[in-house]
Amino acid sequence: MNRTWLVGASEGIGRSLAIGLASKGYKLALSARQTDRLSNLESQLGPEHLAVPADVRDQTTLQQAWQKIIDEWSGVDVIIYNAGYYRPAAADNFNLEDAEAMIDVNLTGALRVLSLAIPAMIKQKRGKIVLIGSIAGYRGLPSAIGYGASKAGIIHLAENLRCDLSPYGIHIQLINPGFVKTRLTDLNTFSMPFLMSPEDAAESIMRSMEKNKFESRFPWLFANAVKLMRYLPSSIYFALIKRQKKLP
């Protein structure tokens, strides 16, 4: 079965991913804060899918969503954590509220969701957890206070889960996209190489899910170039960054 809880389903990548997965036969429980957009998506996809509104910053709403899933389906086979928040933020113009929101939605929200679902997956001795990270989590970047740290945390979390949950038959996947055109990335004033549409990003995510590799990233050329920078000595890495942004 493919009973799937998709968290972060109402906009951008999540909405395109919901449409794509539904077309492939997945049975979806759709979570997001925007109830009107969520209900519209549920109507578009059909009655076999569930709208379970929830705010990933509010454990009570997540518990209510999870209970509805349990009542309707008894459990899930797949969890996809796609909820995300982003604001361009540099350390020399520090905004604590934005930084806290990015950590809370992008990382702590995933922990809240997993705290509900992992015990059930352990009990059934199977399942798949898909975490949508970002190539921004590979190494420190300019103007990424909060966001980069949250995505680095997602990468580390996926590795933790892989270590702990594989003995229970639970498969972990980490998928790191590059730049995707959404209402959030529209806030950027810098060039975004290899910018993808949400539809293309959703297709790449679905292909990655089918391959069952632990880690996937896209677009291939750009994402691999960014990952390789993890292995550069710090002196060389920061010299390259300095060419893009003046550092003190």
Image (cartoon, rainbow, N blue to C red):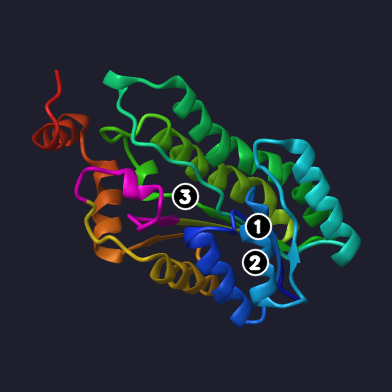
Q: How crowded is mark 1: few (under 14 residues within 10 Å), some or many (20 or more)?
A: few
Q: Give the range drawn in magenta.
A: 176-191
Tag 1 or tag 3, which sits nearer the N-term?
1
Q: In front: mark 2 or mark 3? A: 2
Mark 1 is on which residue type?
A: Asp
Q: Residues within 10 Å of mark 3 (few under 14, many from 20)?
A: many
Q: In this rendering, does residue 129 appear at all? A: no
Residue at far left of view: 243
Q: In this rendering, does residue 112 appear at all? A: yes
Helix, strand or loop at mark 1: helix
To which quarter of the image does residue 136 belong? top left
| Residue 107 drawn at (x, y percent) | 56, 38
Mark sitting on residue 40: 2
Helix, strand or loop at mark 3: loop
Residue placed under numbered mark 3 in the picture: 133
To which quarter of the image does residue 18 belong? bottom right
Mark pair 2, 3: CA separation:
26 Å
**73 sits left or right of 225 in the view:** right
- Asked whether disc 1 touches disc 2, contact meaning CB atoms under 8 Å apart, the reply is yes
| Residue 230 drawn at (x, y percent) | 29, 42
Query: From the image, which quarter does the N terminus lie in?
Result: bottom right
Mark 2 is on which residue type?
A: Asn
Does 161 appear above or below 150?
Answer: below
Instruction: Identify which residue, 212 or 196, lies in the foreground.
Output: 196
Residue 48: say if magenta: no
Query: From the image, which quarter does the C terminus lie in?
Result: top left
